[in-house]
Image: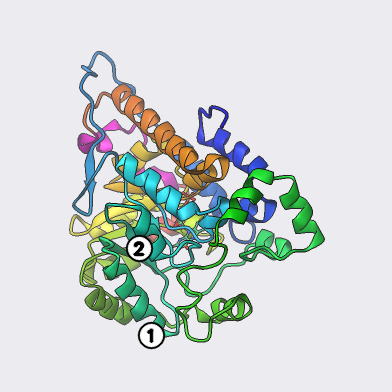
Amino acid sequence: MPKALTIADLKAQAKRRVPTMFFDYADSGSWTESTYRSNEEDFSRIKLRQRVLVDMTGRSLESTMIGERVSMPVALAPTGFTGMQHADGEMLAAQAAEEFGVPFTLSTMSICSIEDVASVTTKPFWFQLYVMQDRDFVLNLIDRAKAAKCSALVLTLDLQILGQRHKDLRNGLSAPPKLTVKNILDMAIRPRWCMAMLKTPRRTFGNIVGHAKGVNDLSSLSSWTAEQFDPRLSWDDVAWIKERWGGKLILKGILDPEDARLARESGADAVIVSNHGGRQLDGAPSSISMLPFIKDAMGDRIELHLDGGIRSGQDVIKALALGAKGVFIGRPFLYGLGAGGKQGVREALEIIRKELDITMALCGKRDIRNVDGSILWTEPKSLIEDDQAAKSRLS
Ligand SMILES: Cc1cc2nc3c(=O)[nH]c(=O)nc-3n(C[C@H](O)[C@H](O)[C@H](O)COP(=O)(O)O)c2cc1C
């Protein structure tokens, strides 16, 4: 793997190595992709305070997320089709995260199954749940995550129906890819990806095939997934899922202060401020611009996490300064995976670790747990201050 200095370097490498259909699946947002773009852009509007002549020795990035020790407060986000960015992608990413000392979250829509990931890791990972209309399947998934000793359930709330992503429709996204002339030519110029993929038996949704009623092969799978996301999902469902799970629960996809107040009442252990990486409601504000408002609405009763647009250690520290206890990264680790498998995920984490460490020092802090709003030059709420309507809704 060529040396990468930034997440953007890994993205460029992944683009060369991963078939277009799967690279595009990662590098896309819904409709005009405006929310996808503002997730990244809004971080650059936040300015840090440069401090000097402060002792910068003996620094520590160690912290906790939902009570678990982490070598830095950055978890890998749940992402579907990860085993299509690189053969056995979820297993490799989980191993890289474990070695690095950060949490890995397995998606319901993963290629490697819960059991596959458990078989190659020694510490508990987190499992992300999509609530499907087939409740027996959901109950069974929760039980499988428990049996695999997952230490947290991440319940995704913002995908009751699917936002439209033009690239996926144009590319005819599927796992495994259909063998059209276009796809065959596209894969043929990426022999490394093909060779690795030919060697693994894991080429479709491992948590679903053979587990959901009536889904025993690939033809039944596509109609099943299209129909199964539950548009009726409600706060009552959160209650029974919490009870059935019985362990740490993280609610993913809170972006509005009103929903944050409801989440606070749900008894969850943490909430992820997220707009699904700009893949659902196009036109929604960026996650980072909403973080101060969600923080206000929730108080300190639930731990706050954030995802969306984090591409550097500088972005991580800005999220922490605005009140997040930890963050999740999606695309940065997927680009690493596509670029170089497990080694690439390790590189993505190392790039962010190094940037975070040095940035913390230049802000005059030595311990990540002491990072707060005092390192910011920007007044947090000024991020959306130009929007009068938003201000009045939130007051
Ligand atoms: C390719 C891709 C697949 C995703 N699949 C899922 C998923 O299966 N479940 C889920 O809760 N979120 C999913 N997400 C959203 C991520 O968990 C996370 O919210 C998002 O990637 C964060 O933004 P970032 O990619 O800018 O870091 C996916 C995101 C991407 C990019």
Residue 293 horizontal/vertical position (percent): 33, 54
Q: 299 or 147: which is nearer to us?
A: 147
Looking at the rendered image, the quarter that the N terminus falls into is top right
Quadrant in which residue 243 is drawn: bottom left
Residue 395 visible in image: no
Circle 1/circle 2 CB separation < 8 Å: no
Residue 348 horizontal/vertical position (percent): 46, 38
Q: 226 or 294: which is nearer to us?
A: 226
> Residue 369 magenta-drawn?
yes
Residue at which label 1 appears: 136
Residue 338 horizontal/vertical position (percent): 56, 45
Task: Decide if ligand 1 comes within 8 Å of the CB at mark 2.
Answer: no
Give the structural element (helix, strand or loop) at label 2.
strand
**Callout 2, which amino acid?**
Phe
Picture layout, residue 322 above or below residue 90 = above
Looking at the rendered image, the quarter that the C terminus falls into is bottom left
Give the structural element (helix, strand or loop) at label 1.
helix
Residue 325 horizontal/vertical position (percent): 26, 47
> Residue 14 magenta-drawn?
no
Residue shown at 49%/39% (left/top)? 344
Residue at which label 2 appears: 127
Picture layout, residue 353 above or below residue 188 = above
**What's drawn in magenta, residue-wise?**
368-385
Residue shown at 69%/51% (left/top)? 20
Q: 101 or 368: which is nearer to us?
A: 101
**Magenta span: helix, strand or loop, mainly?**
helix
Q: Is residue 265 left or right of residue 285?
A: left
Quadrant in which residue 216 is drawn: bottom right
Quadrant in which residue 241 is drawn: bottom left
